[in-house]
Image: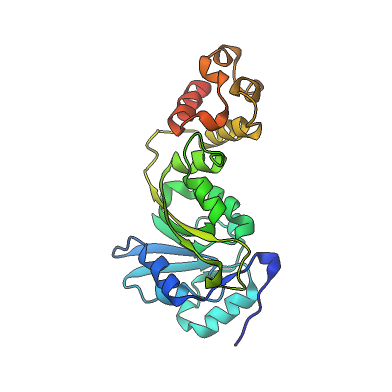
Amino acid sequence: MLYTLKKSLGQHFLHDENMCIKIVEQLEKYAGMQLLEVGPGGGALTKYLLQLNDIHYLAIEIDTEKVTYLQKTYPVLKGKIIEQDILKAAIPFENDFSIIGNFPYNISSSILFKILEWEPQVQEVIGMFQKEVALRIASGPGSKVYGILSVLTQAFFKVEYLFEVHEKCFTPPPKVKSGVLKLTNMHNPFDIKDKRKFINLVKTAFNQRRKTLRNALKGLLPPQMLAYTIMDKRAEQLSVTDFVALYKEYQT
């Protein structure tokens, strides 16, 4: 049974077997691990994930055609595919789990926000992103690409840019290169109790990134905080630790 590619879902299927194996090898495996594959598509990673011993595997896939294809090709997947939009899905496991996937580039940033929502239970993520987005997530302060995704991800996860994936590894080849990231949960090292408030602060600071923080945050922070000298800086100049310090004072 063949399947079709759907541009509306941002589908580019990985066909390079060596790259599939390399991506799966990045997982920190342990007995009884629970694993969610996001967007299995034609099963490029799936067939190798199903060879892993002693794991509890689930996949989430919105494309009905791909779900039918996967279940016919790999009968063991019956009952293990959640046919739903990842962005609307409930958390798939009761306990800690890991995530792997070739994330659709048109919603990869939104998937990252979903992962942040599930963060208390997400131990590790091995994810493929558009290279530009992957570098943005991994970048540090002072970089032109350092932004909302960088700060929010690094506040909760150790971020490692693992390797690049050439466009020729896909069918059809995307117009951009890809990058694989490894996110390792650091278990809320900054003790951020109100994640929504922290996210709102970071987003507000970067939404007007050319302005100083004093101007960008004037509608959010009290006047006494706007007088701080750090407010002379722009959002891209602040480290994750700086943002956490602002958040902690802001929330009290």
Scheme of colours in the image: rainbow
Q: Residue at x 55, y 36 (%)?
A: 199
Q: Looking at the picture, how far across and down is residue 100, in whole percent?
A: 46, 62
Asked if 110 appears above or below 54 in the picture, the reply is: above
Q: Residue at x 50, y 34 (%)?
A: 142
Quadrant in the rendering for residue 207: top right
Residue 212 visible in this rendered orientation of the protein: yes
Q: Residue at x 60, y 30 (%)?
A: 205
Asked if 144 appears above or below 52 in the picture, the reply is: above
Camera-nearest residue between 200 and 176: 176
Asked if 72 appears above or below 123 in the picture, the reply is: below
Q: Residue furthest bottom?
A: 1
Asked if 40 appears above or below 241 in the picture, the reply is: below
Q: Looking at the picture, how far across and down is residue 25, in whole percent?
A: 36, 67
Q: Residue at x 36, y 62 (%)?
A: 27
Residue 117 visible in this rendered orientation of the protein: no
Q: Looking at the picture, how far across and down is residue 21, in whole percent?
A: 40, 72
Quadrant in the rendering for residue 96: bottom left
